[in-house]
């Protein structure tokens, strides 16, 4: 029986973010080239997106390609980007059929015009969909995001459209790539690593974390449900005491 039946639909996190790690090691473990691991990881993306939608998650952010990943061998970088763009094109009809809204965050200045066109096509085609929002963190880095936000805030102060006294946590959040989304309540990382790797550093201030030794291509529907059940056992206090939370 599926674990979905044990999940309390009233306590599902609104925003789940996942650091999809271990594609290359999965491939090596199976005697394949690293690129095949990324290809296998696409199946997990589809399964987890559907699983998240099934239980009422409103936002699912997947860390697909970091700014640091540009430093990998060129053939691997090109293969990953090609795979992502091809997958988006192929999955667009499914997005439309399942009411999925696609969006992306990151610094896309290094992408080709062809890749940018693919991203914009998916964003424009699904912008009126009202189901789960699938956010692809692509060429993303949290320090870069915060740096860009700081530059924009400084420019606004310089132009007189923002005063120093108006700058608070809310202001900073409005200048981040994720300004349209709630902060993630739950962050999952696969492959046995225990770090954020420059992912949503500002937004994860009060996120719950879940780590699994499974490589991303082995993380499927039931593994996702198991993570959600673990989340639902936790007490989120936000600096308060247990007694205050339970009132």
Image (cartoon, helix red, strand yellow):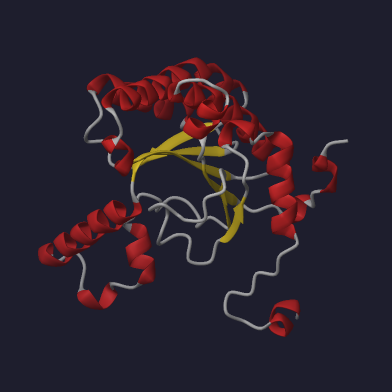
- At a point 70% along the width and 52% down the height, the residue shown is 12
Q: Nearer the viewer, residue 194 or 204?
A: 194
Outermost left residue:
158
> Which image quarter: residue 93?
top right
- Residue 165 in the image: state x and y as whole percent: 25, 78
Quarter of the picture holding the C terminus: bottom right
Q: Is residue 51 above or below residue 59?
A: above
Q: Tell me residue 28's x, y (percent).
A: 51, 28
* Residue 21 makes an appearance in the image: yes
Residue 217: image quadrant is top right
Q: Is residue 155 above or below residue 31?
A: below
Tag count: 0
Corner quadrant of residue 64: top left
Residue 242 image offset from top left, x and y in percent: 71, 80
Question: Which residue is located at x 27 percent, y 26 percent?
Answer: 74
Residue at 57% across, 79% down: 239
Give me the residue at 65% from left, 69% from top: 236
Quarter placement of the N terminus? top right
Judging depth in this view, the residue of 7 and 69 nearest the camera is: 69
Q: Position of residue 105 (x, y in %)?
A: 37, 42
Who is closer to the viewer here, 36 or 44?
A: 36
């Amino acid at each position: 029986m599926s674990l979905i039946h044990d999940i309390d639909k009233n306590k599902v996190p609104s925003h789940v973010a996942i650091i999809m790690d271990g594609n290359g090691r999965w491939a090596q473990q199976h005697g394949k080239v690293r690129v095949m691991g990324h290809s296998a990881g696409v199946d997990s993306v589809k399964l987890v997106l559907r699983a998240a939608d099934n239980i009422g998650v409103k936002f699912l952010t997947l860390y697909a390609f970091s700014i640091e990943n540009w430093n990998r061998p060129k053939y691997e970088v090109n293969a990953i980007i090609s795979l992502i763009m091809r997958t988006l094109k192929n999955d667009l009809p499914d997005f439309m059929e399942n009411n999925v809204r696609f969006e992306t965050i990151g610094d896309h200045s290094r992408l080709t015009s062809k890749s940018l066109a693919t991203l914009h096509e998916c964003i424009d085609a699904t912008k009126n969909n009202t189901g789960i929002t699938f956010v692809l963190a692509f060429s993303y880095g949290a320090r870069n995001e915060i740096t860009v936000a700081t530059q924009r805030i400084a420019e606004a102060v310089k132009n007189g459209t923002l005063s120093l006294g108006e700058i608070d946590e809310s202001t900073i959040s409005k200048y981040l790539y994720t300004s349209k989304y709630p902060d993630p309540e739950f962050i999952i990382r696969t492959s046995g690593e225990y770090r954020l790797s420059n992912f949503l550093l500002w937004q994860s201030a009060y996120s719950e974390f879940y780590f699994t030794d499974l490589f991303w291509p082995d993380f499927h529907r039931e593994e996702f449900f198991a993570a959600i059940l673990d989340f639902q056992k936790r007490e989120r206090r936000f600096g308060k005491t247990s007694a205050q939370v339970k009132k």
